[in-house]
Amino acid sequence: MSRGFALSGLLRLRGLQETKAAGELAAANHALRRRTGERNSVRESLAATEDAPVDSETLMALMAARASTRGMLLELDAVVATLDADADRAREQHRQARAELKSLEKMADRHEITIRNQALAREQILLDDLGATNAFEGKTP
C-alpha cells in the first residue's frame, strides 16, 4: 500500500501562492507600463510646445501651462518610481513563491520515485519467492 505525499496540501497551497504572486507581478508591470506611457506622453507634449507668444498675456499663459505640465511630470515621475519599486517587490515575491513551489515539487517527485522503487522491490521479492518455491518443489518456471 503506497502512502501519498504527506505535503500535498502544502504543495497545492504553494501553487496557489505562486499563481497569486504571478498575477500581482503582471498587474504591477501593467500599471508601470501604463504610467510610464503617460509620463512619456506628457514629456513629448511639453517638448512639442513651440508656440511663439505674441503678447505678454500669451507668454504668461504659456509659462503657466508649462509650469503646470512640469509639475504634473514631476508627479508622474514619482508615481512611476513608486510603481517601479512595487514591480520589483512583486518580482521578488514571485521569484520566492516560485522557488518554494519548485522545492516542494522536487520533494514530491523524489517521494514518487521512492514509492515506485519500493513497489518494484516488493514485486522483485515476491518474484524471487515464487521462483524459489517453484525450484524447491521441482517445477520449472
Image (cartoon, rainbow, N blue to C red):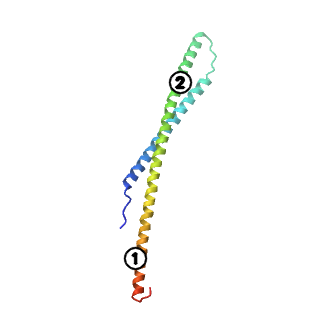
Q: Are dots 2 and 1 in contact, CB under 8 Å?
A: no
Residue at position x 39%, y 83% from top? 133
* Disc 1: which residue: 126
Label located before the other in sequence (2 or 1): 2
Asked whether 89 or 135 is in front, the reply is 135
**Relative to 118, residue 133 above or below:** below
Q: Tell me which amino acid carries mark 2.
A: Leu
Task: Give the number of callouts.
Answer: 2
Q: Quadrant of residue 40?
A: top right
Residue at position x 46%, y 42% from top? 93
Q: Cα distance, mark 2 to mark 1?
A: 78 Å
Asked whether 136 or 80 is in front, the reply is 136
Residue sitting at the far bottom: 138
Q: Secondary structure at mark 2?
A: helix
Q: Secondary structure at mark 1?
A: helix
**Relative image position of residue 130 (x, y in whole percent):** 40, 81
Q: Nearer the viewer, mark 2 or mark 1?
A: 1
* Disc 2: which residue: 74
**Residue neighbourhood size for the residue with mark 1, other residues' Cα within 10 Å, grouped as few (<14), some (14–19), many (≥20):** few
**Residue neighbourhood size for the residue with mark 2, other residues' Cα within 10 Å, grouped as few (<14), some (14–19), many (≥20):** few
Residue sitting at the far top: 56
**Relative image position of residue 5 (x, y in whole percent):** 38, 59
Asked whether 130 or 61 is in front, the reply is 130
**Relative image position of residue 109 (x, y in whole percent):** 45, 59
**Looking at the rendering, in which quadrant would you find the C terminus?**
bottom left
**Relative to 76, residue 22 above or below:** below
Q: Tell me which amino acid carries mark 1.
A: Leu
Asked whether 105 or 44 is in front, the reply is 105
Instruction: Kindly tell me whether residue 71 is visible in this rendering.
Output: yes
Q: Which mark is residue 45?
A: none
**Looking at the rendering, in which quadrant would you find the N terminus?**
bottom left
